[in-house]
Image: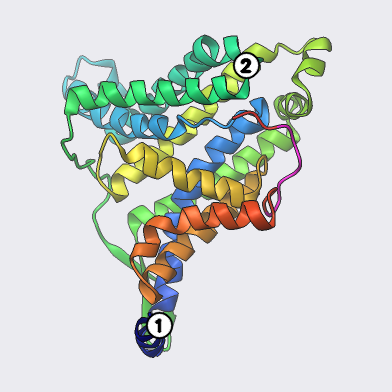
């Protein structure tokens, strides 16, 4: 053990020039974690429920695009198709993406109405088991259709890197996919901030976050807004799934990997905090890249666990969270 530590400390000076690239790459993958944590936070803000099946919905979003893209491309080729007309306004990839988000919105809406709402006032364990069971069922459907086959998501951009920073002649690069991740998450954060703080819809959701019973007493249709929020949260999660599919490969079990990192980011940032979810995702992304190179690649897979353990021991409410009643 001592020899390993000495060896690690000896190699650190040689690795320091890589630090800027690791940080930038960590920010890029952290943006993906942030988007997933953001979608989970939106669900929590409305319902105070942590959806432990959310990772499988993220996975389903990626597969939805994988399935719909060939269909859209085929219909676009038919000049008589309505989709052919739409291509004058948007490329087929964007059309397929929007359709995928719409599908996941509908799935999220229905899942909450059919499976979550009827037991919302029941024991916390019932909610957790229901979310996990629904997630496993969705995973089983995908696995039945595709087995354990590893699939590659079609890429909308060429795999080209761009220099974003140069320190003492050492370039720092991001691919166009990674730049897109950063832009999308920043836009989603801005939109979420405006919606949840500057609109009547946001005021209603905030009232439901404080007390759903009180909101119902003043005339708010709690069930409808909860259904709506689950649809929005699943759509955002689906967008994260698409980005994940572009970064890695499509695999029915990728939902577990996704859920752990999203949950860790949400825990670190603080439950209910939109910007906390984003900051938490960025920190975890950077930690994975830096620790994986400077200490051991084994730490990449356990970083999210370590973050959850440390936060719960030292600051249970996270960096920006507030004390609230939590249903899991």
The residue shown at (28%, 34%) is 252
Q: On the rendered image, what quadrant is the N terminus found in?
A: bottom left
Is residue 256 at all visible to an observer of this figure?
yes
Instruction: Pinpoint residue 254: horizontal percent, then vertical percent.
Output: 32, 40
Instruction: Pinpoint residue 227: horizontal percent, then vertical percent.
Output: 58, 17
Question: Where 283 falls versus 323 (above or below)?
Answer: below
Q: Secondary structure at mark 2?
A: loop
| Nearest the eye: 197 or 282 | 282
For mark 1, what is the residue? 5
Disc count in the image? 2
Residue 257 shown in magenta:
no
Residue 40 sits in which quadrant?
A: top right
Q: Which residues are magenta?
A: 319-325
Which comes before the other along the chain, label 1 or label 2?
Answer: 1
Question: Where 196 falls versus 78 (above or below)?
Answer: below
For mark 2, what is the residue? 120
Q: Is residue 71 left or right of residue 289?
A: left
Q: Are marks 1 and 2 in contact (CB under 8 Å)?
A: no
Coloring basis for residues? rainbow
Q: Is residue 324 left or right of residue 292?
A: right
Instruction: Pinpoint residue 171: horizontal percent, then vertical percent.
Output: 36, 78
Q: Is residue 118 left or right of residue 148?
A: right
Real-space CA distance between mark 1 and mark 2, rounded to the nearest whole angstrom: 50 Å
Q: Secondary structure at mark 1?
A: helix
Residue 230 sits in which quadrant?
A: top right
Q: Is residue 70 left or right of residue 126?
A: left
The residue shown at (40%, 73%) is 21
Question: Where 34 falls versus 294 (above or below)?
Answer: above
């Amino acid at each position: 053990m001592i020899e390993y530590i000495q060896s690690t400390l000896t190699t650190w000076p040689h690795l320091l020039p890589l630090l800027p690239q690791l940080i930038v790459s960590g920010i890029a993958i952290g943006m993906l974690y942030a988007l997933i944590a953001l979608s989970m936070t939106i669900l929590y803000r409305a319902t105070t429920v942590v959806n432990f099946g959310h990772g499988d919905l993220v996975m389903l979003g990626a597969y939805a695009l994988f399935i719909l893209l060939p269909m859209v491309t085929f219909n676009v080729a038919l000049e008589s198709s309505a989709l052919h007309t739409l291509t004058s306004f948007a490329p087929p990839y964007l059309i397929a993406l929007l359709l995928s988000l719409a599908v996941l919105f509908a799935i999220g809406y229905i899942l909450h109405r059919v499976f979550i709402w009827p037991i919302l006032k029941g024991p916390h364990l019932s909610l957790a088991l229901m979310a996990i069971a629904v997630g496993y069922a969705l995973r089983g459907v995908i696995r039945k259709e595709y087995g354990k086959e590893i699939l590659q998501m079609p890429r909308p951009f060429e795999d080209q890197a761009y220099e974003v920073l140069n320190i003492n002649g050492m370039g720092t690069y991001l691919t166009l996919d990674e730049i897109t991740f950063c832009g999308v998450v920043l836009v989603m954060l801005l939109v979420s901030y405006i919606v949840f703080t500057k609109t009547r819809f946001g005021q209603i959701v905030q009232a439901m976050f404080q007390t759903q019973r009180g909101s119902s007493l003043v005339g708010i249709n709690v069930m409808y807004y909860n259904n709506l929020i689950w649809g929005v949260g699943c759509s955002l999660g689906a967008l994260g799934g698409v980005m994940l599919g572009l970064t890695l490969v499509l695999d029915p079990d990728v939902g577990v990997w996704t859920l752990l990192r999203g949950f860790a980011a949400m825990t670190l940032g603080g439950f209910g905090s939109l910007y906390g979810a984003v900051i938490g995702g960025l920190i975890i992304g950077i930690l994975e890249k830096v620790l994986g190179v400077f200490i051991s690649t084994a730490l990449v897979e356990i970083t999210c666990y370590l973050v959850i353990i440390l936060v719960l021991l030292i600051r249970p409410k996270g960096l920006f969270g507030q004390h609230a009643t939590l249903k899991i």
